[in-house]
Image (cartoon, helix red, strand yellow):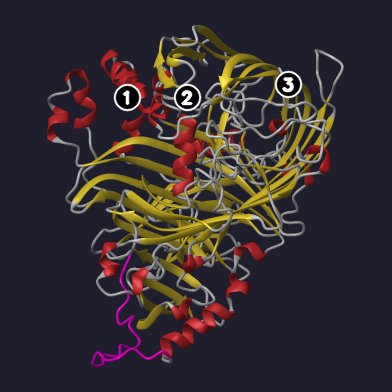
């Protein structure tokens, strides 16, 4: 009787547990486990886990861990791996975590051919097999499925390699952080993780029309004091460097470079292939292929592929490494492993990947980065509603019903579990906050005082011909004051002209969210009174930094400007945005600048007053960016950016003098060309209607800028060319050493070729040409008497450059050449430029 009661109680308890565990997939259990080698106890990567009664399946990731969801009909699992005996396991209702050991299979090597090493032959069994892999890529590619869903777990780590011993003893109360290190992940080294991020996401893909959606529903990451560290930018940058990888892509994007895949369409031109052995596991037969680059300096991998011989010729495992001679800087070691499993339809689906990089210089290892990903719960037949794809392609929608620890498919190591608490403890230390404050001042030029930060430091002092010595005090608000309201401003004083200048801007969010985060919706207003070089736009930073005090060609022509602006910005989730503004400006010529009237050259135009209404439509599909407050910088990928801008000048109010219309269309795009590097193309076309003084027309921008979407010119003078119908083009190309990597001796220097060109073509209407119209102003003249502004003739203005990059890993040298209009006075037709350029 007692035994019957106990048995009944167990059944009742089990029933209650099942009721409490009900999820949308009724009567499903989440089973985690680890597969190891029975003799060595090492984890087995890519081991298959198959259900007997159900088509569900998965495989172990780079840490030997698997995660599978089972329903009540599943009673038995089969574990298998290449080179190991298959093992069956009977599932019980109480199973939640398994540790499975697989025995090695005797004589798994079918054939091994040992031959005398000789000259490599392009036609051999290995290349014939690669041909079959390439021919079957389309059938095996996951993205060929019209509708697809899967879950993904990502873990990104970044930190120091072998922290200096002094950090553990000489940093006072911060020393504890450097004593807790990982000694198991990299043999013979200590790793100190500074940043850890974990994401669990739902991923949806549709082919017709092509749509992608990633919804992050659980996230955890280390964060430092936001006053000094822009945590979202760290996350964006690391996710950009360590992007998800698929061996079926033509190229693998890694560290801002494209490495040709060993199964790319033209891979045989760049790789050599060798059959290592053939392996059998159960009914499946695989061939292990070794590959290596024909030229070790090119952006290529070496490693191994495991290819199935079931008629699909799919890749089950891939191990990729980078040769030490490869033309890549600041990387001492690189390893990438990809694992795939075959679903019930016979398609090889990626279930895990791991990327591990050691950064350093020479024999010194300094930093490391790692990305581990696990993909699971594939559904290749799910029909996804259209509204799922609305909004941004990547959204964070954190679930309040689940904790990361409850759904994490791969458990953290004991060391990783302490990272979060260690960083929190470090953030609480006053000494660490002081260290961050000093670093922020040196790196960004701002000093935080809580709700405000003062700076930038480099704009504190400036010297020019008009103001003499100039002092400026500025600052901006931080999120500690408000995330929905932002303000910035400065007050400046010139000792020569004895005048104060000022600027103030504010932005207020209209969507109840942070004014800075995407997608944003806010109103902004600004007022500014300052002097500007002609062609410079109003704004907080207008190019008058400390370092601009030492330019050789110092400007002597200025505009005393008073500006008022009211604007509105609305960003949609699909990266389409609409911005509008109304700007009133008053400009007075000062210094050597004169606006002599064409109707009477003895008279000058005292001021140029405009009222400008601007509407800009911008579309940047899949754009990623770094941001600080309202300023954003695009992370350059292959997606184009389009912009259409319309301006309307209104006279008759606020003393506005001019009616005009202007239309500008711009596009920018990066073209990745595999082994030929990449090129950046920018184009702008526009037209201005109206009779206007030439400062309101189009002039080439001579301000050097790293903005992806702005075209700047290096060999023109300020105000040299003007037009009201214009086309601007620029192209910059980086070959990444494609040519120099083939040259003996020179290839050891790891130089990289760069070249580019700029074009400006335009026409000046008769009503705006001072030689034909009596309603405008004459082009201004230099103090020596020659005219400094010109209308273009029949040919466009052209300039170009060639150069070498990666000199000593930090320098870039360029030779610039001006192809035409070389007769203009006081210009430079050619010059060399040496600059710092840090790149991998």
Up the image or down, 191 lies above or below 123; here it is: above
Report how far apart the C-alphas of labels 3 and 1 lie in the structure. Answer: 55 Å
- Residue positioned 49% across, 19% down in the render: 466
The residue that label 3 is drawn on is 603
Relative side of 146 to 817, left or right: right
Q: Earlier in the sequence, mark 3 or mark 2?
A: 2
Residue 352 in the image: x percent, y percent? 46, 56
Badge nearest the viewer, 1 or 2:
2
Above/below status of 691 relative to 676: above
The answer to the question of whether label 3 and label 1 lie on touching residues, with beta carbons closer than 8 A, is no
Q: Residue furthest right?
A: 652
Mark positioned earlier in the residue sequence (1 or 2): 1
Circle 2: is it few (<14), some (14-19), or many (20+) Cα within 10 Å? some
Contact (Cβ within 8 Å) of mark 3 with mark 2: no
Magenta region includes residue 533? no
- The span picked out in magenta is 100-122
Crowd class of label 3 (few under 14; some 14 to 19; many from 20; radius 10 Å):
few
* Frontmost residue, 541 versus 160: 541
Q: Is residue 224 visible?
A: yes
Q: Nearer the viewer, residue 592 or 96?
A: 592
Q: Which residue is mark 2?
A: 544
518 lies left or right of 546: right
State the image coordinates of residue 628 (x, y, percent, origin top left): 52, 27
Label 1 neighbourhood size at 10 Å, few (<14), some (14-19), many (20+)?
some
Select label 3 or label 1 by which is in front: 3
Camera sees residue 6: no
- Mark 3 or mark 2, which is nearer to you? 3
What residue sits right under mark 1 in the picture?
439
Under circle 3, the secondary element is loop
């Amino acid at each position: 009787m007692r035994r019957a009661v106990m048995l009944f109680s167990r059944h009742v308890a089990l029933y209650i547990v099942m009721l409490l565990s009900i999820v949308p997939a009724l009567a499903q259990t989440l089973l985690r486990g680890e597969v190891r080698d029975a003799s060595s106890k090492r984890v087995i990567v890519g081991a298959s886990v198959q259900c007997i009664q159900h088509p569900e399946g998965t495989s172990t990731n780079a840490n030997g861990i698997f995660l599978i969801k089972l329903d009540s009909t599943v009673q038995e699992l089969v574990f298998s791996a290449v080179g190991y005996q298959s093992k069956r396991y009977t599932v019980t209702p109480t199973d939640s975590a398994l540790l499975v050991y697989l025995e090695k299979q005797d004589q798994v090597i079918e054939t091994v051919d040992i031959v005398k090493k000789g000259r490599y032959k392009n036609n051999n069994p290995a290349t014939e097999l690669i041909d079959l892999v390439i021919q079957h890529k389309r059938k095996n590619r996951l993205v060929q499925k019209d509708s697809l869903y899967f879950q993904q777990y990502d873990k990104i780590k970044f930190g120091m390699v072998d922290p200096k011993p002094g950090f553990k003893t000489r940093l006072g109360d911060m020393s504890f952080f450097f004593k807790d290190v990982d000694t198991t992940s990299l043999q013979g080294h200590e790793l100190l993780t500074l940043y850890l991020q974990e994401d669990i996401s739902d991923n949806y893909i549709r082919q017709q029309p092509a749509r992608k959606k990633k919804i992050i529903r659980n996230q955890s990451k280390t964060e430092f004091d936001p006053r000094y560290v822009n945590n979202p930018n760290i996350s964006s940058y690391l996710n950009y460097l360590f992007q998800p990888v698929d061996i079926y892509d033509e190229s693998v994007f890694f560290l801002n470079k494209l490495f040709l895949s060993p199964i790319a369409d033209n891979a045989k031109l760049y790789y050599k292939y060798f059959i290592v052995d053939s392996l059998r596991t159960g009914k499946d037969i695989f061939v292990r292929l070794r590959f290596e680059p024909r030229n070790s300096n090119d952006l290529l991998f070496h490693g191994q592929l495991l290819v199935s011989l079931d008629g699909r010729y799919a890749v089950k495992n891939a191990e990729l490494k980078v040769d030490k001679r490869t033309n890549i800087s600041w990387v001492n070691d690189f390893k990438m492993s990809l694992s795939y499993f075959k679903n019930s339809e016979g398609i090889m689906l990626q279930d895990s990947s791991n990327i591990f990089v050691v950064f350093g210089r020479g024999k010194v290892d300094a930093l490391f980065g790692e990305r581990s990903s696990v993909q699971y719960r594939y559904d290749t037949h799910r029909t996804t509603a259209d509204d799922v794809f609305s909004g941004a392609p990547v959204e964070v929608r954190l679930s309040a019903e689940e904790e990361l620890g409850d759904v994490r498919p791969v458990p953290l190591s004991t060391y990783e579990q302490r990272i979060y608490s260690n960083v929190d403890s470090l953030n609480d230390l006053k000494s660490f906050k002081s260290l961050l404050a000093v670093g922020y001042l040196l790196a960004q030029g701002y000093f935080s005082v809580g709700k405000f930060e003062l700076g930038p430091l480099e704009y504190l002092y400036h010297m020019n011909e008009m103001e003499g010595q100039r002092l400026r005090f500025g600052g901006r608000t931080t999120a500690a004051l408000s995330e929905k309201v932002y303000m910035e401003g400065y007050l400046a004083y010139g000792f020569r002209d004895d005048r104060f200048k000022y600027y103030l801007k504010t932005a207020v969010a209209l969507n109840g969210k942070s004014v800075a985060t995407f997608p944003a919706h806010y109103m902004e207003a600004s007022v500014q009174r300052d002097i500007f070089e002609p062609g410079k736009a109003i704004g907080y930073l207008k190019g008058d930094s400390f370092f601009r005090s030492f330019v050789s060609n110092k400007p002597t022509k200025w505009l005393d400007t008073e500006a008022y602006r009211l604007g509105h910005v609305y960003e949609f989730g699909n990266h389409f945005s609409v911005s509008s503004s109304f700007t009133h400006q008053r400009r007075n010529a000062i210094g050597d600048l004169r606006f002599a009237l064409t109707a009477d050259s003895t008279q000058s135009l005292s001021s140029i007053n405009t009222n400008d209404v601007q509407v800009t439509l911008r579309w940047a599909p899949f754009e990623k960016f770094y941001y600080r407050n309202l300023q954003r910088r695009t992370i350059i990928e292959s997606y184009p950016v389009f912009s259409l801008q319309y301006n309307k000048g209104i006279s008759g109010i606020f003393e506005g003098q001019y009616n005009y219309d202007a239309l500008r269309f711009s596009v920018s795009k990066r073209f990745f060309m595999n082994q030929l590097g990449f090129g950046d193309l920018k184009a702008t076309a526009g037209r201005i209607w109206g009779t206007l003084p030439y400062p309101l027309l189009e002039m080439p921008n001579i301000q050097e800028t790293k903005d992806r979407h702005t075209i700047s010119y290096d060999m023109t003078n300020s105000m040299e060319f003007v037009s009201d119908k214009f086309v601007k083009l620029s192209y910059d190309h980086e070959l990444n050493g494609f040519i120099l990597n083939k040259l003996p001796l020179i290839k050891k220097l790891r130089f990289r070729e760069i070249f580019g060109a700029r074009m400006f073509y335009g026409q000046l209407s008769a009503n705006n040409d001072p030689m034909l119209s009596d309603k405008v102003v004459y082009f201004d003249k230099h103090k020596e008497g020659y005219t400094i502004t010109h209308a273009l003739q029949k040919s466009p203005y052209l300039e170009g450059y060639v150069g070498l990059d990666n000199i000593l890993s930090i320098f870039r040298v360029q030779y610039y050449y001006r192809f035409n209009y070389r007769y203009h006075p006081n210009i430079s037709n050619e010059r060399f430029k040496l600059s710092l350029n840090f790149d991998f």
